[in-house]
Amino acid sequence: MTKKLTGNQIRQDFIDFFVEHGHTAVPSMSLVPGGDATLLFTNSGMVQFKDVFVGTDKRPYTRAVDSQKCLRVAGKHNDLDEVGRDDTHHTFFEMLGNWSFGDYYKKEAIEWAWQLLTDVWGLDKTHLWATVFKDDKGNIPSDEEAADYWRLQPGFQKEQVLYFGRKDNFWEMAETGPCGPCSEIHYDRGEKYCDKQDVPGHVCAVNGECTRFLELWNLVFMQYNRLGPDTLEPLPATHVDTGMGFERIVSVLQEVNSNYKTDLFTKALDVLRSLTSHTAAEMQADFTPYRVVADHTRSAAFLIADGVVPGNMGRNYVCRMIIRRAARFGAKIGLHEPFLAKVAEAVIAEYGDFYPELKKNQATILDNLTREEIRFARTVEAGTAQLENLLSELRAANQTTLDGHRAFDLYATYGLPFEISRDIAREQGLDVDEKGFTEAKEIHSKASGGGKAMGKLGGEDSEFFAGIFKQLQKNKKLGEHGVEYDPYTGTQVDKYTGLEVLALVVNGESVESASLDDQVEVILPKTGFYIEAGGQVGDTGYLRFLPAPVMGRGGGGEGGAWEIEVAGMRRASAGVIVHIGEVISGQPKVGDKAVAEVDLVRRHDIMRNHTATHLMHAALHQVLGEGAVQAGSLVAPDRLRFDFNQPEAMTPEQIERVEKIVNDAIAADMPVTFKEKSLAEAKKEGAMALFGEKYGETVRTITVADNDHRYSYELCGGTHLDRTSDVGAFLIVSEGSAAAGVRRIEAVTGRGAYELIAKRFKALKQTAGALKSSVEEVPAKVESLQDEVSDLKKELANLRSQQALATFDLRLSTVQTVKDVNVLAVEIPDSTVDTLRMLADKFREKYPKGGAAVLVTGTTVIAVVTEDLVKRGVKAGDLITGIGGKGGGRPNLAQGSLPEGQVKDALGKVAKAVEEKLK
Ligand code: ATP
Ligand code: MG
């Protein structure tokens, strides 16, 4: 094989090949099979064509080709146990398929499969094996037709058709209905891929125990209709349904021994490795956590893109479980902060072109991952500690299986999914009873009216909060609009003092008081905390007990004092805004009076970044044109991130101009003003509205303007500075690609800008110090050093080749004579392929006839033989393989490699290899 195709090219090759053969390219169906209540997830290519086979659906085509998204983590197909432990099973994977609906049949299906694998992709024909059906019960005829077609394929090794029984080679959709024999294609990766080499008596075989033979592709021929356990009738029309594991074919074509070493996973694993700071070798040494995280993140990203977010039941539970399991395996390699979003970005970058739903839902995917990690992190330690206790008890009682009901309690209380409890139990040689868990889950879900009582865990608790709202309205604690929200003018503490605690929610239940360390949700009559929206992150801060004024005594220090650290905000249902936090001291009670304090330092940083975002958006329009519209935005305290439509990378000059325009706007000290308007009016006036943002009837508009000049005008619900000068300074940190046609800028302002300048300046001073120059002279100094290095490199290369020549001349005296042939076998240390080739020419000059030489440096080997010897049967490539190497080339000159550590041995075999070939 010569060409190394990328995964994306391989997928496209497959589709193109079948389109050329009259197939219609059909998009993948969703991972959530529409209208199929029997199936949790799409688990093979045929799901979207099931009704066509049964005859209840008709398509405008009779031949189709697709790459189907599949998930095998539930029901009949559950590969979760394999994932991470092996290199060929994933939870999510793609299945490539070609389909015939009453059109072509076995002849073409086999012919085309063969052509694609061998002609188009150049797989070695001797490595391919086919299996066909032979009934182990002796009732259904053997599929000799398929076997014969295989034997007819050009270059197919006739003895490599094998017969297997019902389990492997007969496919049925259900107890009754369409079914038929199938034919699998297996690829022999070679002896060294066997993972059972140490097992005495092991023999590698197709459908065997080891990893040498890889099942690649399954061709299903539907020709029968099953009426009952023993009755088949022929179908009126026959169909073809094929499924090839995409990741597996990519691993074969890219010649790697693991799906995870294909380019499909490179980006994700690189991100992970940059987070753990492991080297590639360290990663390989403990590959399982990497495999699990990469696999699960990919699954979660695709699931969320198809609308399945983390939750408590059914599909949503699976999404939650996968994310939590990924987080736990991440912890095994030292990742504790939320990190999955970063990995998911890499997944989206790899797959977003073919599966646009990933790009479209990028923000939702990243957001859900991070939230779920945070949610899990809050309880995981308590949960695992509790589990450890249960497991110790189990061991003490000499038992091995943990009661499923108790495992469910761990889930209900600490959010520890069954699969994670089982992982942990298994790591200690114990197990968890799955049936009991499912049972307990069902009981619980019925008792609580469909999982609602699990409250916060599910995020499906809006009815619960609507109930609280109704009650508060009835008691006249809240008006019809609910909690008053003013993050704009109202961050001052004095405005938010003396607020009554209206409700406290702990673990999804309304409580009268909360205790130390409780995760609590707090409802107050009004709030100045910003709720994450429009890219601007939510506020954090504190709620504190406000002591009633007591005569002659100051506040504080009373028995009732308490404090809640607010980590985030959410709208739990219409009219209900909750502060999400943790009790860090005391015992807050419903009815207590409180002060709500936004973390103003952090908020101020956020506002700098938000106002700067507007300034930059306007600057981008000036520099790049009106097409540079916003495609996404993040406004955080430490940085701003801005995605915008732009087909190509910005030039350094453009970036500098944008930076300058923004800093000029800052220096101009313009006022930033807001006004409420009707949406229609604001749009008519040319306010920039943001893509994908939902606006109400009345909107807030933010204007940055000089006396006579309007600099920026946007619809925006975020919080802003009063004047631009308050941004301080604005620096672009990076400009890069966010997606096809979308660029991303990250920038810092204010305190962040100062920190960046200070850091860069320090590095520059250190560099100048090391170069013994002034800061101004650094560029010139570096340039001259680079010149010097490149001269030295040239000189070194020269010296090396002279040295190689000297060694070579010396070794010419070791030429052996085998029959009448001059044979040379030498190792030239520290050399290059080019030098070896030069030496090969030297050798031929010296021995224009009757000469054969093998030259090695490192493990690279070059073999050269003179023309007369080629005619006598000695080929350069054969010399390399004859001494245990791999490689090829022309008959008189070949290049290849020798196995590590066997160079000396190999060189010793050269003379014999020549002798054997000589005719
Ligand atoms: P295996 O025995 O390897 O689990 P299978 O018999 O379950 O495979 P099929 O149901 O025939 O596989 O699916 C068709 C193809 O999909 C297989 O030939 C294989 O290449 C691929 N495949 C199956 N399961 C997975 C998985 N979990 N991850 C990646 N690829 C898979
Ligand atoms: Mg399987």
Image: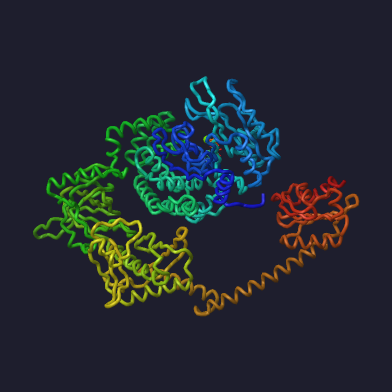
Q: Please tell me which residue is depicted at 39% across the width and 60% down the height of the picture.
A: 631
Q: Residue furthest front?
A: 60
Q: Is residue 72 visible?
A: no
Q: Residue furthest left?
A: 551
Q: Position of residue 149 (x, y in %)?
A: 66, 34
Q: Position of residue 745 (x, y in %)?
A: 42, 64
Q: Position of residue 217 (x, y in %)?
A: 58, 38
**If the picture is divided into quarters, which one holds ligand 1?**
top right
User: On the rendered structure, is 226 left or right of 721?
Assistant: right
Q: How is the image coloured?
A: rainbow
Which of the two residues, 229 or 552, is positioned nearer the viewer here? 229
Q: Position of residue 253 (x, y in %)?
A: 61, 47
User: On the rendered structure, is 99 left or right of 317?
Assistant: right
| Above or below: residue 494 compared with residue 311 | below
Q: Residue furthest right?
A: 820
Q: Is residue 136 visible?
A: yes
Q: Quadrant of residue 552?
A: bottom left
Which of the two residues, 625 or 306, is positioned nearer the viewer here? 625
| Above or below: residue 636 compared with residue 348 | below
| Above or below: residue 216 compared with residue 4 | above
Which of the two residues, 622 or 16, is positioned nearer the viewer here? 16
User: On the rendered structure, is 724 left or right of 836?
Assistant: left
| Above or below: residue 620 compared with residue 387 | below
User: On the rendered structure, is 779 left or right of 407?
Assistant: right
Q: Please tell me which residue is depicted at 62% across the width and 52% down the height of the picture.
A: 4
